[in-house]
Amino acid sequence: MTDEMLRAPAEVKYAEELDWLESIDDGPKPFSWRLSPRMVRLFVLGSERSDGLDREIPQKWFGDRSFVERSIVTLASDRGLLLIGDPGTGKSWLAELLSAAISRNSTLVVQGTAGTTEDHIKYSWNVSMVIAKGQSRDSMIPSPIMTAMEGGVIGRFEELTRSTSDVQDALISILSEKYVSIPELDDDNIVFAQPGFSIIATANSRDRGVNDLSSALKRRFNFVRIPVVTNKRSEAEIVRFRTVELLRRHRIELELPPTLLDILLQSFADLRAAAASARSDDEKLESALSTAEQIGVLEDAILHSNFFGDRTLRAETLAGSLVGSLARRQPEDLAILNKYWHGVIEPRSKKDGGEWVDFLEGGRQAIATLS
Amino acid sequence: MTQSPFAALREQLSDAAAAFAGTPGALSGILSGMVDDVDRALGEQLEIFPVCHHSPGSALAMARRLRDKQPEVIYLELCEDLRPVLDELRNCRLPVSLQAFATELDGFPDAWGPLSVVAPITEASAEYQAIAYALDTPGVELVLVDRSADHVFQWSPQEQPDQPADAVGMEIGDLRPRFAELEEHLLHHGKVRHWSEWWDQYVEQPLAGADYDTYRQVMVLIGSLFRRLGPDDAGRLARDEDRERYMWTRMREHLATSGADPERCLYVCGAFHAASRVEEFGLAAERTEFAITPRTATTWLYGIVPASHSAIEEQFGLAGGSVSIAAATFAKAVSRGGVKPYQLKEHASKRPARARKAASPVRREPLADRLSGFLSRPPVLDELDEAELLGWSVDIVRLARRNGYLASTADAIAVFETSILLAGMRNRARPTPYDFQDAAVTCIEKDTVPGRRDVRRLCEILLGGDRIGEVGYTAMPPLAQDVYDRLAPLGFDLKKRAVHRALLDLNADPALAPCSHLLWILHRLLPDGAVRPIMGSRRLGERSVQESWDLALGHHQRALIELGYEGVTVEQVLEQRLRRRVWDPKATAAVALEAVEDAIVFLGSRRLTEELGARAVELLAAERTVDDAPDVLRGIRRLLAHYRATEPALPDWCERFVTTGYAHYCTLLPSAFVAEDIGVRQVAAMLGFLSSMEGLALSLGCDRAQLELAVRQSHPETPGKVALLWGAQFRLGVLPLAELRERCDELLANPLVIPSFPQYISGFVQALEPAPALTPFVVEVISNAFARLPDEVLLPWLPMLITTLRQEAPELVPVLVREAGRTFPGTLAAVDAWVPPWTARPAPRAEARPVVAGGPVAELLAAHPAAIDAVAALLGCEGGWQPLGQAVPSGSGPAGALLTRHPATVTAVAELLGGGATS
Ligand SMILES: Nc1ncnc2c1ncn2[C@@H]1O[C@H](COP(=O)(O)OP(=O)(O)O)[C@@H](O)[C@H]1O
Ligand SMILES: [Mg+2]
């Protein structure tokens, strides 16, 4: 089944692992949870030898373990969980993993946009059925959130801050009253949330100010802030983890040389340091330089090498992809990259040689083509 | 579940051992070696008490053991020369640091100085328990056995060119993985974030109910593991081993001379040292001859300086708040009863401690079994813990509200529950402060921090906050006491950590003058912010009658105490520092002049100023560079002005300075004019010195010809210096203004020179230093430049002009502006009609002819033309004679044109003069 989907949700992808964990789990489980909190943590963060398991559980989300712990205990309390952070820090991925582990369903998702309406989080009507049979529970289309309430499972709300305040207000009542009433119906017109229902929302901290959350809504969420990973080792793991997955998904046979991964990590680290010391937005790349961005660069380079190159990942290609993905604004971003290439990569390639030389060349060409 | 509370720790340690052992065979070696280490330490005849820093468990175990054993001698791992200051601890509020300090080095590279060793002491520490017990129990001797501060530096790698500028921190019982990977491994596998949390979870908590032997086993075990898994930093381990040899040697010496019974002694050292394998270890050691090198001749001074929990965390790389949390944990354990900790009695309440002399020591039972002594005891969860957590939860919400958070009772409940859930998930019997902190952050922190402090910081404050120590008056060095005494008339308690605003009206209350004087000296000596003048100033010839000060001595106690290592009064310290400055190999004349000024302003000692002044003369004469010429010029000018105003005659050194300077700068002038690396500003300052000191120098026997010769020998090439030379020549009277003007006109007329004209202007501005009379001319040159230079030259150059003027000639700009104000009209309307004085003036050549077109001189010359013709031929003048008396066409020339266009003025003048004719 996994193979037939372009991208399987976590509960499908890790179904076998989750089954196994459930079978050995003897810890107390809150509400209708399928796993105990400790097992959820184990699933997300991977196992240690000291956990004494018969099989190894790989780590799936990388970052400070207290973020995961705080998220799990929040879901076991009566508050919603809001993961907030820069784009590409793995918020959605963590939300997916948590709901997969807790409810075996990570697909009850509402995407927050300016066009999201109350219907999207409550219910709407199947117009043809209403015409045929009138308004009834049968002709009602429950939203993912309502489905989650009925099932006592986790509902997800992506990019909460992008939705309008009406939608946010509707969410307040769901989170505090824990039911939704359907005034159009005469009876059976209240849907109660079953125990175990909770919401994991994500918000992009760069969106702040678009639709600021009201304090009433804030109060109903615990915030867990996910920072950009700056620890090179865990970052390398994330990138490798995702890339291997990606290669598998595209069925690509391609070697990822460790030295190239190092180059990628190093250049991102450099650019982040530069962004941190920039005095104005013009001196800063528009990109948040997140881990996901790195994965994007690598993905681009891999696809490029596979389809347009000789199926070997080369430093030139990587440089080209990096420049291509990061140079978003002309001329600001290009100027920054140009400066970086001259001021940092060039001396480094002189000093360290190796793949840096090709990286220098590839970047130069890409910059030249773009400007 | 009756799992041993130490199961987790055991697993952590054996895991780490396995991970870092290297070869598979090495692991069993390490494990059995650890057992040996524990056996050896616990079996030693001299009882070893292993400690770990900032471990409440260590402190509690120490208090218990002291009450049980009542030892007569305590050997403590602490620099032995710090012993005398320990007695002063009772006059301080902890945390404080014991300090050894040396500024006069003898036997160490000078670049290392000043040397400083600090050993922080907190109340919740085993060492404080030992110290308090020993000092307050009659008949108990406290012997410090670690190497002296001097040895700390003797043993530090000598090849290092300079020692860390900061003090070297010493901690008793430094017990931490010795390399980053091991610590990372423990944190990762222990599922905690930082070292303090690991320690709390795996060591402190299980130790809470452990007995003494278990305590010792666990500590030595950890020390042993870290030692055996140490990195290949041979130097550090060798130093540690030497320290162990040192300590055992000292203890053997003491036992031999005092005849103390080893059974009644206690050796307190870090767990790391308890697991030592040096041959000198133990009273029964086979090797006992360790040669302790003598100290160097460096003079060491000792004292106590305030410390703070946050500073300790910072210095020793501990997580923020961890020392405070350790203190809170200790306090909680104490309040729970069971242990009565020792506490130094203050001197004030000095009553002879009741002779409860070493009452009934409990003998140690022989050790039954070894590592299996890890007790099996289920964790306890008691009501006290729950009440405490509830209290914290309520308090944090209150604190958060006060800091701008929208927190409510619902949050308090959420924090409480979340703490317990987190602790459960983290395998802890009860929530630790770290769980609580995480829970509070989770439930209260939202997307923005409303006030100055975030929830994490608020938790730290709640759990004890930063504690800042205070050194009591009697524990301070004489200098600090003297300062406090002398500032007493201000009426503040300056030892308090507060900022006091002092207002001194010296007219109304002349008795405060000495305070004011002292404050100025402190201002000069202490770091910024310790005493800060808000109003009033003190400089040469300047004294305020009203002053206001912000005094924050309480915050800067350490700096004040460290001054005390340099002398017994601030005056003495300042005097020494001034002397040291001028005798420094890098000292310059400018520095020495500054020192003279400081001596006059702050110390008023004629002897000292003469000495410093004489040194200034020496330095000036020996100087080969003129980089400091601007500072020298300004310094000596100020001093001359001061002496002229206050003394009947100049001091001898001053006169010598002027004559030396005159000759010195004359000699260097020609080369300075051409040297590329010497700026226009420097040369201008030299010329400034020469011209403004000229009168005095000549009266003292200098020769003006020397200067004239020097100027004549100067042949600068760069435009700035050329202009400067012209200025100097003008000042000496060898270049008349007219010619100077002409040269400038030529420059402006020459398109090849125009781009560098701005540099000429800079040179002219600098020339104001030696030739202030040139001011109107400089205004004229600048105005002309603005009028005539093409925009493409002028515009790019403008910013440069402004910055150059601001940087290089800040004191000359006002002069120029004033002059320009005099020259230019004051209103906009007047500008239209305004004629610059220099254009209104008849141009020297073109219009000279018509002017001398008549009169007796002309007649004479006309009668005897030969001489003039010859001169004219010589000069290459063409033209020839004009008929005498012929009227000059009055409308010719620009002036004429101007007058024709604006006749009103001339008409008015003519009317005034009574002439009726019009042109
Ligand atoms: N900490 C992380 N651990 C694992 N994968 C991560 C992490 N951060 C980013 N990623 C990867 O980056 C991709 C984008 O992350 P995503 O969850 O969509 O970011 P966000 O929602 O924060 O914008 C994810 O698919 C994931 O593979
Ligand atoms: Mg997302």
Image (cartoon, grey):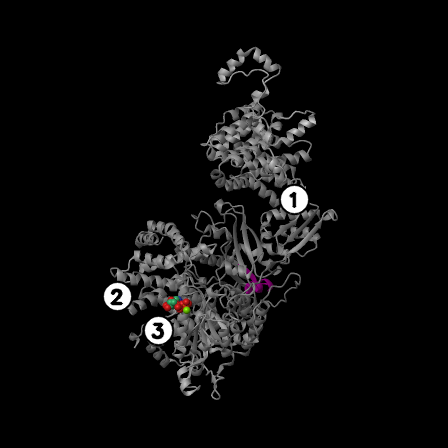
Three-letter amino acid code at disc 3? Answer: Ile
Q: Report the span colored magenta.
A: B128-143
Task: Using the rendered view, name the quadrant where residue A196 is placed.
Answer: bottom left
Q: Residues within 10 Å of mark 3 (few under 14, many from 20)?
A: some
Of the numbered discs 3 and 2, the one sitting upstream in the chain is 3
Please tell me which residue lies in front, A48 or B816: B816
What residue sits 64% from the left and 47% below the top? B520
Quarter placement of the C terminus of chain B: top right
What secondary structure is found at the residue carrying circle 3?
loop
Nearer to us of marks 2 and 1 is 2
Residue A29 seen from this side = no
Q: Which residue is mark 2?
A: A253
Q: Residues within 10 Å of mark 1 (few under 14, many from 20)?
A: some
Residues at circles 1 and 3 in contact by the CB criterion of under 8 Å: no
Q: Which residue is mark 3?
A: A57
Question: Magenta span has B129?
Answer: yes
Q: Using the numbered discs, state the Cα–Cα distance from disc 1 to disc 3 in whole angstroms.
A: 73 Å
Residues at circles 2 and 1 in contact by the CB criterion of under 8 Å: no
Please provide percent x and percent y for residue B694: 60, 28
Q: Is residue B829 left or right of residue A204?
A: right
Q: Which residue is mark 1?
A: B538
What secondary structure is found at the residue carrying circle 2?
loop
Please tell me which residue lies in front, B104 or B836: B836
What residue sits 62% from the left and 55% below the top? B552
Please tell me which residue lies in front, A186 or B545: A186
Residue B774 vertical placement versus A112 (above, below) = above
- Asked if badge 1 and badge 3 are on a common chain, one would say no
Q: Using the numbered discs, state the Cα–Cα distance from disc 2 to disc 1 in whole angstroms.
A: 79 Å
Please tell me which residue lies in front, B117 or A293: A293
Three-letter amino acid code at disc 2? Answer: Glu
Residue A44 vertical placement versus B480 (above, below) = below
Mark 2 Cβ inside 8 Å of ligand 1: no
